[in-house]
Image (cartoon, helix red, strand yellow):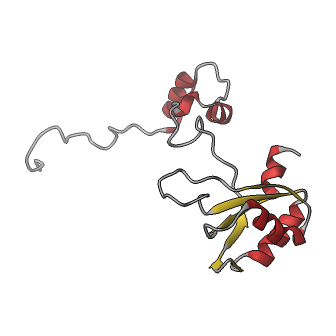
Amino acid sequence: MADANRWKATVYVGGLAPIVTSSYIHDAFIPFGEIVEVQLPESDGRNPGERHRGFAYVEYEDVADAKEAIDNMDQSELFGRIIKVSQAKAPKSADEGLGSKKALWEQESWIAKNAGGEADPSSEQAKMLQDTAPDPMQGLEGLDVAGPKPE
């Protein structure tokens, strides 16, 4: 499956109780379609006793199944907690967008969007400004002397 379609067929499940396992998630979400994978990210170790981070990703084979799961499971109760189920968002690349360690003008997406292939843009812009801009000094004649105007 293409990467974009894969994320469209994946749902985010948040607000999970610490007791929840990936098999519980699988059992709760299987009625809506064929599940490819359930990911339950492990705890980072800061809070002892936690097995996971409180959320999971459920990837379906079909995008329609993912939408069905969102419609039916969002704001439902699982092990005493109200869970949030929504469309999963594709992770951002560490080399793209704001907050990356790479300069904006060196990023492939920015180059593709902004590279026009012009020979010398500065001379074209200067010529265009000369043709369209009025003289900024026009109408200022006689203002080089301070004080009231002589009659």
Residue at image position (53%, 22%) is 123
Residue occupying the far front of the picture: 49
Q: Position of residue 110 (x, y in %)?
A: 62, 35
Q: Is residue 150 left or right of residue 141?
A: left
**Residue 37, quarter of picture:** bottom right
Could you tell me how many numbered marks the image carries?
0
Looking at the image, which is closer to me, 133 or 61? 61
Residue at image position (82%, 50%) is 6
**Residue 12, quarter of picture:** bottom right
Q: Position of residue 82 (x, y in %)?
A: 64, 78
Looking at the image, which is closer to me, 131 or 47? 47
Residue 86 sits above or below residue 140 on the image:
below
Looking at the image, which is closer to me, 98 or 16? 16
* Residue 128 in view, yes or no: no
Q: Is residue 103 left or right of residue 139?
A: right
Residue at image position (9%, 43%) is 146
Residue occupying the far left of the picture: 147
* Residue 96 in view, yes or no: yes
Residue at image position (12%, 49%) is 149
Residue occupying the far top of the picture: 119
Residue 77 sits above or below residue 42 on the image:
below
Q: Position of residue 94 (x, y in %)?
A: 58, 38
Q: Position of residue 137 (x, y in %)?
A: 32, 38
**Residue 114, quarter of picture:** top right
Looking at the image, which is closer to me, 145 or 44? 44
Residue 9 sits above or below residue 101 on the image:
below
